[in-house]
Image: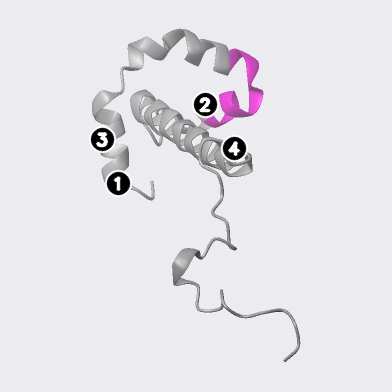
């Protein structure tokens, strides 16, 4: 896990029993995940650590997807883009003419 502090914080609030139905469905519906689970649990990882890591990574992916979707959204109409031509009275070129001298 790249972010040890973030993972530790996630684990503090993780309730394994609350995910029992989801875990059963994942193991039933996802053969590659089931094979990985069978290979790692309990020889390499405990049941709890396997699912903590799994759900932590899922949460990270969901956050990344939210950020990606936000970047793809057009800017809101509530905050119009600034006008480049609105220099106001501080415009040093306001007295210039487009006419040749």
Question: Which one is nearer the viewer's eye here, 74 or 20?
Answer: 74
Mark 4 to mark 3 CA distance (whole Å): 25 Å
| Residue identified by numbered label 4 | 69
Residue at the extreme top of the image, as rendered: 21
Residue visible at 67% across and 79% down in the picture: 97
Mark 2 to mark 1 CA distance (whole Å): 25 Å
Cβ–Cβ under 8 Å for marks 4 and 2: no
Label 4 or label 2, whichever lies nearer to me, is 4
Cβ–Cβ under 8 Å for marks 4 and 3: no
- The number of numbered discs placed on residues in the rendered structure image is 4
Looking at the image, residue 7 sits to the left or right of residue 22; the answer is left
Is residue 44 located in the magenta-colored stretch of the structure?
no
Q: Position of residue 88 (x, y in %)?
A: 48, 63
> Is residue 50 placed above or below 81 in the rendered structure?
above
Cβ–Cβ under 8 Å for marks 1 and 3: no
Label 4 or label 1, whichever lies nearer to me, is 4
Other residues around mark 1 within 10 Å, as few (<14) / some (14–19) / many (≥20): few
Question: Which one is nearer the viewer's eye here, 48 or 83?
Answer: 83
Considering only order in the chain, which callout, 1 or 4, is on the residue closer to the N terminus? 1
Other residues around mark 2 within 10 Å, as few (<14) / some (14–19) / many (≥20): few
Q: Position of residue 83 (x, y in %)?
A: 57, 56
* Disc number placed over residue 9 in the picture, else none: 3
Query: For residue 52, which quarter of the picture?
Result: top left
- For the record, the magenta segment spans 27-36
* Disc number placed over residue 38 in the picture, else none: 2
Other residues around mark 4 within 10 Å, as few (<14) / some (14–19) / many (≥20): few
Label 2 or label 1, whichever lies nearer to me, is 1
Q: Check disc 1 and report its element: helix, strand or loop.
A: helix
Label 3 or label 2, whichever lies nearer to me, is 3
| Residue identified by numbered label 1 | 4
Looking at the magenta stretch, what is its main secondary structure? helix
């Amino acid at each position: 896990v790249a972010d040890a502090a973030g993972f530790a914080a996630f684990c503090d609030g993780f309730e394994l029993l609350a995910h029992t139905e989801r875990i059963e469905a994942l193991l039933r519906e996802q053969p590659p995940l089931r094979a990985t689970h069978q290979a790692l649990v309990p020889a390499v990882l405990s049941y709890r650590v396997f699912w903590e890591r799994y759900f932590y990574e899922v949460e990270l992916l969901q956050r990344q997807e939210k950020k990606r979707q936000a970047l793809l959204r057009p800017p809101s109409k509530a905050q119009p883009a600034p006008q480049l031509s609105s220099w106001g009275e501080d415009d040093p070129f306001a007295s210039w003419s487009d006419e040749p001298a």
